[in-house]
């Protein structure tokens, strides 16, 4: 293989591209990661990692640094609603802090809690953390300052072309797989001929990232996000002096020459801005790509789906994409993953994006109606009454933890009725395709932390009934851990004597007794069975 050849080339070194490269490396697969920028973005972009993303990132060893550089665990996650900051608050949606969620986790051990709570941190900080991990990994070749231009595919792989952003010199890479993690305006998606379908509104916005220690911004107490009816979203980025303010722009409206003046006018108060760090324009839309793969070209993250920031779905859905795709690419390249495995990437992840798009739309609808109602002269009492029952929107752990790969060709599905899905809670279940319950074992070990890097056969049988599948997997070079557990509480929560868990912590198969043919199960979950 030449220096400019790789089994996997990834375009875009944002959080999704870096997570994909790290996931591949965790499975022993090298990649070339190419980005047009030399450093992490300065603008914070996203601000929330949900608990499921934290679980997935924990597998990669980056959670301690994310916690260290993120918002302190003592701060809650509150939404404030007001006409402007000169008037009293109309409504407050309160959500517990990370510390409070940890207290709840300590009080229950029935699988209804997360393995990791959420974390607030700027997306620029997450990108910096992941880039540092990428740069330290010998299996990842990070090349920056390169702009993706075009691609050509053939039966053996893909040729991708790049231009040096400074010199204009070209670079050509040859790979078996090319993955576009290059954002909403993905050039990889465009060159692969993959279309995008959108619903709902599209809109332009101006985003201002600034520092201010002015106490006027805290006159209503601490909050994560304030929705101001005059047309502004104000976000506390670090619970200290860093903020972003976002306001809509008409399609033909120029970017303001003094965006801080617009912020002050819409907030209804004067305050001191110590420094404007960056100003960007962004366009909101609700869109999902029509396909996630064209032969050896695949897309993930914002290249595959775009959401408004309402609900915290964008980066979190993308991290799920990266982990799902990463272990499957590694399996195919290592020889134990069959052709159906890569087909399952779209079959599993695109329905999640379509669902999250609708969930995003439900909260966006509240954000859009609130200023319209206020502008129409609706009373404070009516506005408060409108907002109060909508508070459930931010208690959405069912969205984050409860997605199931119900139509996947590499899941051994069951007959019968699946467990109910609840918006506001985690339903503990090992129903095939689900995330299994998080349980503390005797001695305070976490079951999730005992799962292997590849497949894991979790064996509650008491007779080591799963030993045979592990031996068969070993003969076929399929990485599998045999995890024998003797704990009645865990056995109750996990519902079956034998549960086969995939590398991405989703259940592939379960049963109370070994099947008649373990090889048939392995063929199915590793992608060797035709659709």
Image: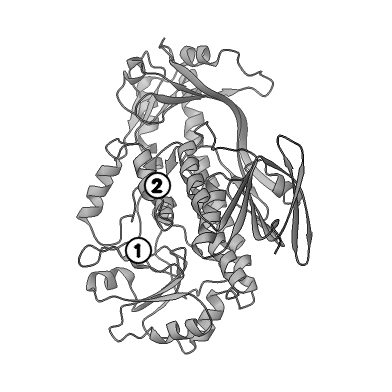
Q: Which of marks 1 and 2 is in front?
A: 1
In primary-sequence order, the first of circles 1 and 2 is 2
Residue at 57% x, 76% y: name it: 336
Q: Can residue 376 be seen in this view?
A: no
Q: Where is residue 250 in the image (x, y as percent from the top left)?
A: 64, 22
Q: Which colour scheme is used?
A: one colour
Quarter of the image with the C terminus in it: bottom right
Q: Residue at x 31, y 18 (%)?
A: 219
Residue 488 in percent (x, y) is at 23, 73
Mark 1 and mark 2: Cα distance apart in space? 22 Å
Quick one: label 2, few (<14), some, or many (20+) residues within 10 Å? some
- Examine the rendering and report whether any part of residue 280 can be seen: yes
SS under mark 1: helix
* Number of marks: 2
Residue 189: assigned label: none
Residue linked to disc 1: 448
Image quarter for residue 464? bottom left
Question: Depth check: 332 or 75 in front?
Answer: 332
Question: Where in the figure is residue 234, as x and y percent of width and height?
Answer: 44, 25
* Residue 443 rendering spot, x and y as whole percentages: 20, 65
Where does label 2 land, which residue? Answer: 396
Determine whether, in the image, residue 309 is placed left or right of residue 437: right
Which residue: 41% across, 41% down? 393
Q: Which of 414 and 301 is in front in this view?
A: 301
Left or right for 256, reference 108: right
Measured along the vertical axis of the image, is residue 461 above or below residue 118?
below
């Amino acid at each position: 293989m030449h220096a400019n050849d790789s089994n996997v080339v990834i375009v875009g070194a944002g959080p999704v591209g870096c997570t994909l490269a790290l996931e591949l490396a965790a499975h022993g697969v090298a990649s070339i990661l190419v980005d047009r920028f030399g450093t992490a973005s300065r603008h914070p972009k996203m601000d929330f990692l949900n608990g499921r993303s934290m679980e997935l990132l924990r597998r990669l060893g980056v959670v301690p640094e994310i916690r260290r550089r993120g918002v302190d665990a003592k701060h809650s996650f509150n939404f404030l609603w007001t006409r402007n900051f000169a008037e009293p608050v109309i409504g407050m949606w309160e959500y517990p802090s990370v510390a409070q969620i940890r207290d709840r986790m300590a009080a229950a051990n029935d699988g209804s809690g997360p393995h990791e709570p959420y974390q607030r941190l700027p997306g620029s900080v997450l990108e910096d953390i992941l880039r540092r991990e990428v740069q330290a990994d010998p299996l990842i070749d990070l090349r920056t300052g390169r702009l993706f231009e075009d691609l050509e595919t053939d039966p053996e792989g893909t040729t991708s072309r790049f231009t040096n952003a400074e010199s204009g010199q070209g670079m050509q890479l040859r790979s078996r797989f090319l993955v576009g993690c290059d954002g909403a305006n993905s050039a990889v998606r465009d060159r692969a001929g993959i279309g995008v379908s959108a619903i709902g509104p599209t809109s332009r916005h101006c985003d201002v990232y600034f520092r201010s220690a002015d106490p006027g911004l805290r006159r209503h107490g601490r909050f994560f996000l304030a929705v101001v009816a005059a047309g502004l979203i104000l976000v506390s980025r670090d619970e200290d002096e860093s903020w972003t303010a976002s306001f809509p722009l008409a399609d033909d409206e120029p970017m303001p020459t003094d965006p801080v003046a617009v912020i002050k006018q819409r907030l209804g108060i004067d305050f001191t801005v110590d420094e404007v760090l960056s100003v960007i324009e962004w366009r909101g839309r609700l869109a999902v790509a029509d396909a996630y793969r064209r032969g050896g070209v695949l897309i993930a993250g914002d290249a595959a789906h775009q959401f408004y920031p309402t609900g915290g779905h964008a980066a979190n859905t993308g991290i799920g994409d990266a982990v799902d795709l990463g272990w499957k690419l590694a399996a195919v390249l290592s020889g134990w993953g069959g052709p159906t495995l890569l087909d399952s990437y779209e079959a599993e992840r695109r329905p999640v994006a379509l669902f999250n798009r609708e969930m995003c739309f439900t909260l966006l609808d509240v954000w859009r109606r609130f200023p319209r109602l206020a502008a129409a002269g609706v009373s404070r009492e009516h506005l408060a009454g409108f907002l109060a029952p909508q508070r459930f929107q931010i208690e959405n752990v069912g969205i984050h933890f409860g997605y199931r790969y119900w139509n996947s060709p590499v899941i051994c599905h069951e007959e019968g009725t699946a467990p109910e899905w609840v918006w506001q809670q985690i339903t503990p279940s090992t129903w095939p395709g689900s995330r299994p319950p998080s349980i503390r074992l005797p001695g305070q070990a976490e079951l999730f932390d005992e799962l292997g890097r590849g497949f894991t056969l979790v064996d509650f049988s008491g007779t080591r009934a799963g030993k045979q599948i592990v031996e068969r997997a070993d003969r076929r070079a399929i990485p599998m851990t045999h995890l024998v557990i003797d704990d009645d509480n865990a056995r109750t929560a996990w519902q079956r004597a034998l549960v086969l868990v995939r590398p991405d912590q989703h259940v592939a198969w379960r049963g109370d007794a070994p099947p008649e043919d373990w090889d048939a199960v392995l063929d199915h979950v590793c992608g060797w069975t035709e659709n």
